[in-house]
Amino acid sequence: MDEDRRIVAAEKVTAQETVVFTAKDGFEKTEGLLTRLDDDTVVAFTNYCPHWRDVRLDKGSSALVRNGEIVCQKHGATFEKSSGQCDFGPCEGAVLDTFEVTVDDGAVYLTDDEFDAAEPGLSEERDLSSGGRIDF
């Protein structure tokens, strides 16, 4: 596997938490999050709530994962870990975009052809949300 696409050691990805990463395509960056399903499969979704794309699901210390769902702590929306589909909240019916990832030789790699590199962590160390909105 290409080391530029290595995200993290597979053992760091658990079913109870998420691990944030940044996918790169040239100068463009997109944040994603990794989590593990009950069948031990590692999946990756975009790290943004579809309701407000400036709201991160994982701010760098894991998204809230509860009852097999990823929870948006800003809106209370819940997303099925197996599909990324929102089954409750203001974006109900929306689906998180996915990334193709592969576990190989104890590490998780970004294998999505839309990107040429990946690294662990947030793309920027700041809150993307202005905090000025009061509606849902």
Image: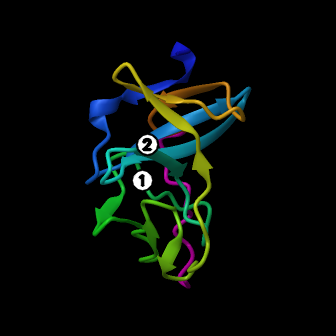
Residue interval drawn in magenta: 124-136
Residue occupying the point 56% across, 55% down: 128
| N-terminal-most mark, 1 or 2 | 2
Q: Which residue is mark 1?
A: 58
Of 62 and 134, which appears nearest the observer?
Answer: 62
Disc number placed over residue 111 in the picture, else none: none
Q: Which color scheme does this rendered protein use?
A: rainbow
Give percent across and percent down for residue 59. 41, 51
Between the residue at mark 1 and the residue at mark 2, the CA separation in whole angstroms equals 6 Å
Give the image quarter of residue 112: top right
- SS at circle 2: strand
Coordinates of residue 9 in the picture (x, y in percent): 34, 26
Secondary structure, magenta segment, majority class = loop
Number of numbered tags placed on the structure image: 2
- Mark 1: amino acid: Asp
The crowding category of the residue bearing disc 1, from other C-alpha atoms within 10 Å (few below 14, some 14 to 19, many at least 20), is: many
Left or right: residue 1 versus residue 20 is right
Whether 47 is among the magenta residues is no
Instruction: Work out whether 9 lies above or below 134.
Output: above
Proximity of marks 1 and 2: CB atoms separated by less than 8 Å = yes
**Residue 120, percent across and down?**
44, 31
Q: Which residue is denoted by mark 2 in the rendering?
A: 20
Residue ID at (28%, 45%): 14
